[in-house]
Image: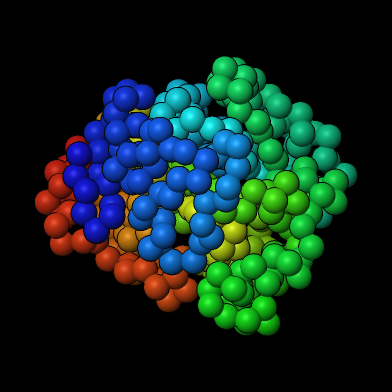
Amino acid sequence: MTVAARVVVAEVRSVRDMARAMRELGLAHRAGPAAQAGPAARAGPGPSTPEAAEPTFLVKPAWFSPHRANFTGAKELDLVLGALPPGRRIVIEGHSAGRNYGGREITPGNADENREWIREQDRLFLERTGIARVLERHGAEYLNVTEEVWAGRVAPAEKVRDTVGRAFGRGAQETPVRDESLFGVVPQRLFELRGSVLVSLAKLKTGSWSLKNLFGLIPDPMRLRWHGERGELLGRSVTDIASIYRALFRVVGLVEGVFEAAVYREGGRHRIVWGEYDVLEGLGLVLGAWNLVTLDCCCARLFGEDAGKRDFLRIGEAVFGEAARVPPELEGVLSRWRERLLS
């Protein structure tokens, strides 16, 4: 295991390995009700852990699509839920038009009339992947942010705006969030849990890591408008929703390629609508940090990418004050992992 500039790079093969990585991040295995996850206090905006009978851990998996190596599967979720310190576990995610088994095209214009079909696809995803059984085994709740918004169970937008403004050291009328409609789509249940730890559990795959994983908390099942016509809005949309959730919670990023990682490249064995990719099995790699921008820059380096070409990282550096670069002491270890990943 390598720890540098608060970025943990660990080989993980078991729950014990994952728990060790979490301890290195400050998530003590025996965390008490008011435990402070040390590095989080210096991770930019983010409230302190609330006093409670038991701590609550929120986990945001990557469930955009059901394609192999592109989502947090049952084994991966089981590993993380089993390694977290004692406390309540709530898995949070929004509906996704891409998380379905075919038969119907969902657009921004027809999502409302297809709510029941979208719900059924979500249920099928949880059942067919075995995730439903993992949730039951760990006594974990699944809270779908889209369903909460559809039901009108949202926190008052002005309270969310005020919380974000104060977290960033600004007034309620001056926040880093450009699209203020996002203040009105935070579930009340989650707002009441502010100050808890939120794990952004991302897949190790080309171009989408811990910061972008929070994009899935925008409740629209089809998020085309948040991308823009040519993708020009995506970076700002990612940092907008990340600003809100990082103000409400103590967000720690975990990017895992324990059992499978996806490497997108021309000629890859697997082909889906947005590209071709190969699956690397058994890599056993986990990267983690409270500093999501630096963490994701490390992930970009693993894939041989220039992090500066990712809008969400450039904007994130300015918004969160986190360095969009790889800590020099990690260059060697990332180079060795990159050889294994891209071989």
Between 138 and 335, the residue placed more toward the observer is: 138
Image quadrant assignment for residue 63: top right
Whether residue 283 is visible: yes
Q: Is residue 77 above or below residue 109?
A: above
| Residue 227 in the figure: left or right of residue 25 | right
Q: Residue at x 21, y 61 (%)?
A: 327
| Lateral position of residue 36 relative to residue 335, left or right | right
In the rendered image, the residue lying farthest to the right is 113
Which residue shows up at 73% across the image and 42% down it? Answer: 105
Residue at the spot 82% in from the left edge and 49% down from the top edge: 153
Q: Where is residue 275 drawn, in percent x and y?
A: 46, 45
Farthest residue toward the left? 332
Is residue 212 visible in the rendered image? The answer is no
Q: In which image quadrant can residue 132 be found?
A: top right
Where is residue 29? Give x, y as percent: 38, 33
Q: How many marks?
A: 0
Estimate the x, y position of residue 19 in percent, counting from the top left.
35, 31
Residue 116 coordinates in the image, percent (x, y): 83, 34
Q: How is the image coloured?
A: rainbow
For the point 36% across and 53% down, the residue is 38
For the C terminus, the image quarter is top left
Closer to the camera, 99 or 63? 63
Instruction: Report the quarter where the N terminus lies.
Output: top left
